[in-house]
Structures are given as C-alpha cells and as structure tokens.
Amino acid sequence: MKHLNTTAKMGNIFSIFASNALLVILFCLISYGAQAQEIDSLLLRQMDSIQQLFQIEEITVKASLPKTRMKGDAICTRVAGSVLEQAGTAEDVLSKVPGIVVKQGQIEVLGKGTPIYYINGRKVEDPIELERLQSTEIKEVEVIRTPGAQYNADANAIVKIRTVKREGEGWGLLASINDAYCPRYSNNQLGGQININYRFKNLDFIGGIAASDHRLNRFVAKNTQEMYNPGKAFIQSAEQVYKQHFTSMNYHLGIDWQIRENHSAGVRMERQDNLIGHSDLYLSDTVMLNGQASDLLESRSITTSDGLNSWLAQAYYSGKIHQLEFNLNLDYYHTHQREQAVTDEISTADNRSVETSSRADGNMYAGKLVIAYPSKISILHAGAEVSLLMRHNQYRAIGSPIPADTSRIRDNIYGVFADYGFNIPKAGVLNVGIRYECTDFRSRSLQKEVKRLMHNVYPSASFCTRIGQVESSLSYAVKTYRPNYRALRSSIEYTNRYMLTSGNPNLKNEINHQAAIQARWRFLSGVMTYEYKKNGIFDWAFSYDNNDQIMMYWVNLEEPIHRLSAFINASPTIGVWHMNYTVGVQKQWLKMEMEDCRESNGKRIIRYNKPMWIFNANNAFVFPTRTKKHGPWVVEINSELFSAAHWGNAELMGCNWNLSVVLQKTWLKNDALSVRLKVNDIFHTAYQKVKLDMGNIIFTQTPMHGEQRSVYDPQTISVSVRYRLNYMKKEHNGAGRETRGRL
C-alpha cells in the first residue's frame, strides 16, 4: 500500500485512492483519531453500502477522473462534467470519442465498421435515437472493440451509452428543436422532440413524441457503368437528379418499478410512423456501344412509401437473490413496409412505362436471460438467448418481363453462453468465454426453396493488466456477420432497362477472427486490431441473360480478407483549450482473379491493398462567464481527413476532408437552455469518388457522402435549441438486439 499523508481538520475528511485490486479508505475523526482499513475491491462491489464498514451519516467524495480510461478491454470516455457534456447530440459526442471516427457521414469504430449501440443496456434500433439523445443526458461512453460471449455473435463492435441518473420526485421535461439547411441545394432537415418524465416514490413514468421532416430539393450524382463482352464494349454515362421528402413521427411510453432494493421491472412501447415518403429520380443516360452512340435514355421514377411503420414492445426484470443476479429481457418487434413506383422511360429504341410494387412484413420474438454469480476474486456469467423471426416479401412489376415473386423467410437463432472472469494476483484480470448458436434458416419462394441448419461455436478471451500508469488489454474473439433479410430475398427488382437488382438466399454468414491490443497512459490511448475474414459479403454485378442488362446482388467472396488497423489518440487540456486528436491507419490485403475479356488469357488479377490514413483534430475552447447565471461560451473547430484507399472491393479515390465550426451558449440554472450553431463541411470537400472493379464490369460514382438519405450533402448550417427541466432519461434493456436490425 502506498504511503498516505492526511492532515485532520475540523469535521470529517475522507481521501480515497483506488488501484486494480485494493481500495483504501482513510478517514480522520477529531474525536476518535485516525483509522485505516483495506478492502478487497471485488468484495466491496457487492456490499449494499459503505455503512456496513463504518457507521457514518455521509460521505463526500471529490476526485479528478480521467477523460478516458480502460474498463477491462473497453475504452471508457467520461462525458458528464467534461467539455463533451455540451457537444450537442449523442452523434456529436460520439464523433469526438477516442476510437470512433466519422467516415462519409457514418459513425464507425476505427477498423471495425458500424457498431451496435446500447443506451443503458437497450439496443438502439433506429439511428435517429442518437440524434434525439442530448449530450447533457450522457454520463459516459464505452467502446468495446472485441465483444465477448454475452453479446450476439454478429456484434462486431459495441458502443455503450450510459445516461445520467437524476434522483428526486416530480416532473421532468426535455424539449429540443433542430434545423439544418444546405445552401448548395436548398435541402432542409427539421426535427424536434418533447420528452416527459414523472417520478413518484418507486415508480418512474416516461413518455415522449418526436417528429422529423427531411426535404431533399435537389441532389446531383454522376456515375459511369462499363460492361465488356467479347467484341463488345458497353459504356453508360449517367447523371442522376434526386428529390425526396420524408416525414416521420415517433412515440414512446414506459414505466419502471423499483419493487424492492434488489428487484426492479419495467415495460416500454415505441411506435415509428412514416407519414410521408416520396422520392423523385430523374436519369439522363448516354449509352455508347464500341465507341458509337447507341441509345439516349431519359427516365423519371416516382416512388411513394405507404404505411411504413414499426412497433417495439419490451419488458425486463432485474433482481438479486443472495449472491445470484438475474437479468431477463423479452422483446416483440413488428415492421411493415409498402412501396409503389412508376418509371417512365424515353429511349431511342422504344418508350416504356413500368409500375412496381413491393411489400414486406416482419415479426420477431426474442428473449434473453443472464445469470451472474460473483465471488471475492471472480465473477461468472451464464445465460441463453433466442430470437424467432418471420418475414414475408411480395414483389411485382407491370410492363416488364420480370416475374412476380412471393417469398417467406424464417430464421430462428438459439444461443447459450458463459464467460468467467477472475483476478490473477499481481498480474491482472483474465476473462474467457464461449458462445454456441444454432441457426435454423428457411427461405421459400416461387422459384426455389433454401434450408440451412447451422451449428457454430464462438470463443472469446481477454487479459487486462496495469504496469505503473499504463493500462493495457489483449483480446481475441470469433465473430460473424449475418446478411440482412433484403439481401436474402429471391425477387428480381426493376431499376431501369439496363439495371436489375436482386437478393441471394444462398448467402453464407461471414466468419471473422479478431485480435486486438489496447493501451492507455494519461491522455494518450492507442489500439491495434487484426482481422481475418472469410465469406466476405459484397455487392457484385453480372451480365443478365447475356444481353446489355446488368444484375446487381450480393455474393460471398472466395478469397479471405486480412485487415490491420491502428490508431493513437491524444486528449490533453491546456487552460480553456480541450484537444482530441487522432492519427490512424487501416490497411487490408485482398487479391482476386477476375474474368476480363479484354485480357489475352481472359482473366485479370486485382489487388485491393491501398491503406487509408486518418487524421482527426477536434478543438473545443470553453470560455466561462463571470456570472453563475449563465453557462460558458463554447467554440469548436473540428477537422476530419481520410485519404484515398481500398476498402472491401471498392476503391475510394481522392481525399475526404470535413472542416466544421461550432458556436454554443447556455443559460439559466444547470445550463437548462442551450443554443448551438454549427457550420459543417465549410469548403464542400467531404466526399469521395468510388470505383467498383469487377473485371468485365466497372462502376464509378461521385460524389459519395454516405448511405443514409440525410447525408446526401454534408455542407449544412444548423441551429438547435434545447430546454430541459429536471429531466431524467431512462431506457430499458432489450433482447434480440442484433436480429432486429436485419429486418
């Protein structure tokens, strides 16, 4: 034990020093002198209160927590009490957390892709929840790069968000409104929410409503499509003009009941409605055959989404009997999608009008039980998880030779898991786990029937230690990726006379072996990850029926992919200047032999090995005011830079650079009123040209910003206003978390 120097003063003085294995409490009482006692930290975590050791009335703890610390093999970043508390929404917070980057408008864990989000243990189903959650409600963010056996096998990376727990009784209110305007195309994204909380004794009532209105008045993209057959070079150069309008409403209602000290339960219901779903696509396509103009195609597609909605119902129970801890979650999820489209084409060859309609209904039932048994030096988790899913698809196209199709998918996943963690004296903490999953998949359509029964075992292990002031961890896990159900559909869908899309019911799950090493010292943290992926799932294109039509769908690559990623983050503070700098690199090794009729031997070797360099610099300047009635001024200057690279089977051409500036001010008690102004992508450089080389077929498109419709153009000027009054955010746990996202 380290030597402690404490000087007694009038009253009670408590100094707390924490290490990996010991917690020392030293207190001085003027009337009784000084006492000291050592307590095993694993024993302390199970005590109902510190008063079991000392009969005292109150303990006041003052400490300076690090911004970022290691929590086992996870990197945990403190938000409450830091400059991130005034960052805006949860999305704004995540973009500044070490190990997380924003690529083409998408939030990713560096080297791991899009993570699975949890808010207080409940999986986030719709990314819009991250826009609604305010930074002032967040306590901390935990990034798990190698999830263990407790998580579904397709959880490649986990981001846990814990909210601030507010005590007391009475009403609470959170209201906010945000408006983002794109000056280049006059696009506008308007959203608002009102959440109400009422706490009475051991009951908590929560409810709220949120609305969003996204208007895409104009967006222009250019793409080139090349297809080569023996003696034929077929090249299309197209300009696409998008217009869209989406309006949605979200409602949620829930109750939490603290039955007794160690027993709690709750229910939550949520509904999402798309009130307006309308898109308009104009295509101007010049077709060249062997260098000569073959066709000039102009088409307009008007698509409406009618009755798109989803329901989510959740129930949970958490309890403790003696040393055993129980956590039970039950979920039901329903989604309904219906879409109609009319495509009018004017061509040199002939004119055509095609009407298409599609419908998809999905239902999922899921449950998960986790039992924990802690002891003085170890803790054991064991449990089971099940998800039962059914999906019904219908598609038809009038005015096209594409056949109508009806398909039903049933996908049942049964899993059991166990992990065991224990202290190794003077060494660290070792955790080992194993997960077994049985998957019963069946797909039946008018064309074919596919049945698969899969048995898989997913081991995991991690070791965490501390040497001096350096915290570090080493982890390994086997993960999978299951394709979403749209990728598994069998129907052929009409895009235009030269492009068709479909799914692939024969897709196999990806298998991914992951190993990672992490370390943290003061304000520096770093991580290195290696991945070996088999059965990689990617978009692919083929010539359809040996004519000029191209079929796009998903395939499993025969070649494995090796990936290595590393980053270093520095988060120092100098006076009012809060820095968060990240330097990283992602590199993959992928070699494929393609069919290419232009080569003498009919084949071509393609290597996707170019690394991506990442440089992120987030700067926040916090200027306190002289009066306590008003909060500080916050000025942010943030920069994100991604180099050209290869990723998967795509080539990202050119650099992607986003420079943004933020000005924020808070007023009233506890910073209840906040106004935030943000100018994003000042120089309009946050895009890249993307190229897909598939041998005989090559696609290129620019500009590419991201997959979400709200990221068509990141150059925006946004204003958000937030007001909160005694509001407490409360979320539930959930089951079937990874499966719902595939619907």
Image: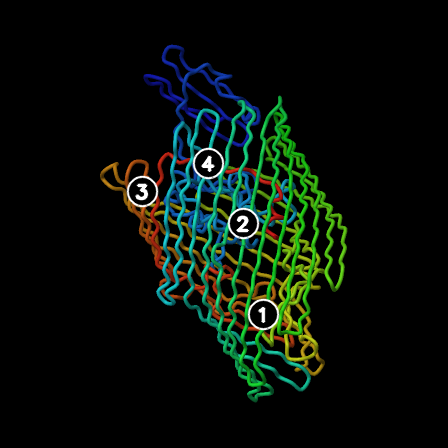
Residue type pointed to by label 1: Glu
Q: Which residue is mark 3?
A: 673
Choose the circle earlier in sequence order: 2 or 3. Answer: 2
Q: Which residue is mark 1?
A: 355
Please, which residue is most extreme toward the bottom here? 292
Q: To which residue does mark 2 refer?
A: 527
Residues at circles 4 and 2 in contact by the CB criterion of under 8 Å: no
Residue 556 visible in the displayed image: no
Tell me the amino acid under the disc marked 4: Ile
- Residue 535, horizontal then vertical, whole percent: 69, 59
Q: Residues within 10 Å of mark 4 (few under 14, many from 20)?
A: many
Element assignment for label 2 = strand
Give percent across and percent down for residue 564.
59, 57
Mark 4 vs mark 3, foreground winner is 4
Residue, x 46% and y 36% (percent of image)?
206
Q: Quadrant of residue 594?
A: bottom right
* Disc nearer the start of the sequence (1/2): 1
Residue 108 image point, x, y percent: 52, 54
Q: Please identify the residue farthest to the top as the structure is shown.
A: 31
The residue mark sitting in front, 4 or 2, is 4
Compared with 52, 342 (above or below) is below
Q: Are marks 1 and 3 in contact (CB under 8 Å)?
A: no
Under circle 4, the secondary element is strand
